[in-house]
Image: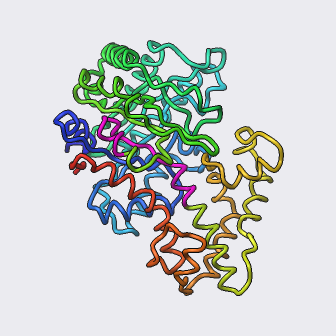
Amino acid sequence: MRHPLLDIARAFHAGRPCGIPSVCSAHPLVIEAALRLARDLDRPALIEATCNQVNQEGGYTGMTPADFRRFVEAIAGAAGFDGTRLILGGDHLGPNPWKHLPADDAMARAEAMVAAYAAAGFSKLHLDTSMGCKGEPPALSDALTAERAARLAARAEAHRAGTLAPVYVIGTEVPVPGGAVDALDHLQVTEPAAVLRTHEVHRHAFAARGLDDAFGRVIALVVQPGVEFGHADVVHYDRAGAQALSQTLHRLPGLVFEAHSTDYQSEAALAALVEDGFAILKVGPWLTFALREALYGLDAVADVLDGHPPQGRLMATMDAVMRAAPGHWSAYYPGPPAEQWLQRHFSLSDRIRYYWPAPAAQAAVGALMDRLAGRRIPAPVLRQFLPRLPEAAEDAETVLIEAVQDVLRRYARAAAAGGAAPA
């Protein structure tokens, strides 16, 4: 069986650019919304887990790759999505979760992780070995990065399962997962020469391990096209500034680019990215940001329907949950207490997403949904608190799905901008 992602590069080089959104989230409602939309549009769905979220040791979700597969497949079954059109990916697969360890130890664990992803049938693997481990510089040379990536690919090839041979994404210029934490005024578009050098050193590294067939399934390189977001700012795609990078693809038949941190781009910018060969569009924080907006909006709606002004109970609960366990946000949200409070709830990096699985958060959301169960939301009330959503979203469950799909539809339209779409 031919991997559907191979057709994206073929279409681009045939002058019919198309793309696919890569949904990077472990939130069940986000995944449900994505699969429902893919079902309705009759398209495949690409769902990815990161090395920190999901790994052989459980990650911060507590799920191994096999667990995550079962988790997504259960949602797909309930949503009526054809499981044969589900593409599971592993993002930033490498030593990052263990980079505090010496390189030999970190890479051994990374190999075990990649083997677990491959054995669980994940068929899109982003190999990210660009970071230094204990005692190494923060960024490694292209040659060492490529050697380590080939080492991981060998493990994936040895443990692969399922009907699809895995496709690979490589690259040495990998943006920070989840958005930037520093100022955005020094963002640099990847140099074309760096792209060609990265491709060549990886080709040699794969060949040295007898992985020529696997290298033939490298579908994309991760590059920086000049898009990023911080706490409140977004660097939008400058098409003119990325043209030299885009043109590099004409020297790399069979390949496209993978663009990380595309969250909060305009729909026009997303379409331009696809047309310029940045065909795999990573999106994650924007989806849970939209979900958080909808939940806070519904909390206000519930109070209004109960006959009193909004009291912000859900926001207060989430703030208490985040302050009780600051590990996921304190290093990312600097400044005085008032600024930290604002960022905890409204930063575009959306680090609140780590806290929705907490028991107190789940109880608060459950109580909110119970308050709204069976209640129709009048259109004027919906417009007051969630004006971007269609007035047909009259119940709480529909509001949450629509909020996420409002973002995903922009990606879906952009992905089909060239008139083609993966089968």
Q: Is residue 280 magenta?
A: yes
Magenta region, residue range: 271-290
Q: Is residue 300 magenta?
A: no
- Residue at 67% x, 82% y is 304
Residue positioned most to the front: 240
Q: How is the image coloured?
A: rainbow
- Residue at 41% x, 19% y is 191
In the depicted structure, whether residue 272 falls above or below residue 403? above
In the depicted structure, whether residue 366 falls above or below residue 199? below
- The answer to which image quadrant residue 160 occupies is top left
- Residue at 32% x, 59% y is 83
Residue positioned most to the left: 14
Whether residue 122 sits left or right of residue 328 in the image: it is left
- Residue at 36% x, 25% y is 245
Measured as percent of width and height from the top left, residue 330 is found at 75, 42
Measured as percent of width and height from the top left, residue 1 is found at 19, 44
- The answer to which image quadrant residue 224 occupies is top left
Total tally of numbered discs in the picture? 0
Observer-nearest residue: 130 or 161? 130
Measured as percent of width and height from the top left, residue 170 is found at 39, 27
In the depicted structure, whether residue 251 falls above or below residue 11? above
Measured as percent of width and height from the top left, residue 418 is found at 24, 46
